[in-house]
Structures are given as C-alpha cells and as structure tokens.
Image (cartoon, rainbow, N blue to C red):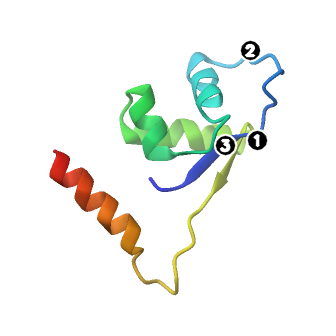
Amino acid sequence: METLVHSTIPAYQDISGLIPEYQAINTLCRQVRSVAEISALLRVPLGVARVLISDMAAEGLIQLHQPQLDAGKPDLNLLERVLSGLRRL
C-alpha cells in the first residue's frame, strides 16, 4: 500500500499498444505515487491495483520503491495516516 511507483516509460513514447489499465497507471506514475493513491485515483479495489502494478513491474514498465522501516519498528507517520484514514470512514 505504501510502496511508491513511477513509470520507466518516457513521456514521449507511444503507449497505445498497452492495455487501457496499464496506460492509465503509466500516465499517473509520471509522478511518483503510492499504490493506495493509484487505486483511489483509478477507482479500483486495492487488490486489483496491486496485481496490475505487480504485472507492470515484472514487465519493466514501472519501478517500485519500498519504504524503509527502522529495524522493524512501525513507522509513526504511516500509523498516523492509517488512523486519519480510519477516522474519515
């Protein structure tokens, strides 16, 4: 969910050969975005976004960046964002 994603395809390259979902993700990921953000912007379930992103990463269309956690301790910023999101529900 917190993994950051960005496109490896240059903006000038033709992406019309990609499936529409890949095209949408590629366009969104010209700026670095989180998996959760991509899911929300595309209005697809998080699980669907994760599968699409994983497939695109396997094909080399996007690059993934995992957040670093200090020695297994929970990230306080992440926990605060989760709590804030739960309160908005």
C-alpha gap between disc 2 and disc 1? 15 Å
Q: Position of residue 52 (x, y in %)?
A: 55, 35
- The answer to whether residue 78 is left or right of residue 11 is left
Q: Nearer the viewer, mark 3 or mark 2?
A: 3
Indicate the secondary structure of the residue bearing disc 3. Answer: strand
Q: Look at label 2 and name its amino acid.
A: Gly
Q: Which residue sits at x=78%, y=32%?
A: 9
Position of the C terminus, as image quadrant, is top left
Which numbered circle lies on residue 17? 2
Name the residue beneath numbered marker 1: 60
The answer to which quarter of the image holds residue 77 is: bottom left
The answer to which quarter of the image holds residue 42 is: top left
43 relative to 33, above or below? above
Q: Nearer the viewer, mark 3 or mark 1?
A: 3
C-alpha gap between disc 3 and disc 1? 11 Å
73 relative to 62, above or below? below
Looking at marks 2 and 1 on the same chain, the residue that comes earlier in the sequence is marked by 2
Camera-side residue: 59 or 13? 13
Looking at marks 3 and 2 on the same chain, the residue that comes earlier in the sequence is marked by 3
- The answer to whether residue 14 is left or right of residue 80 is right
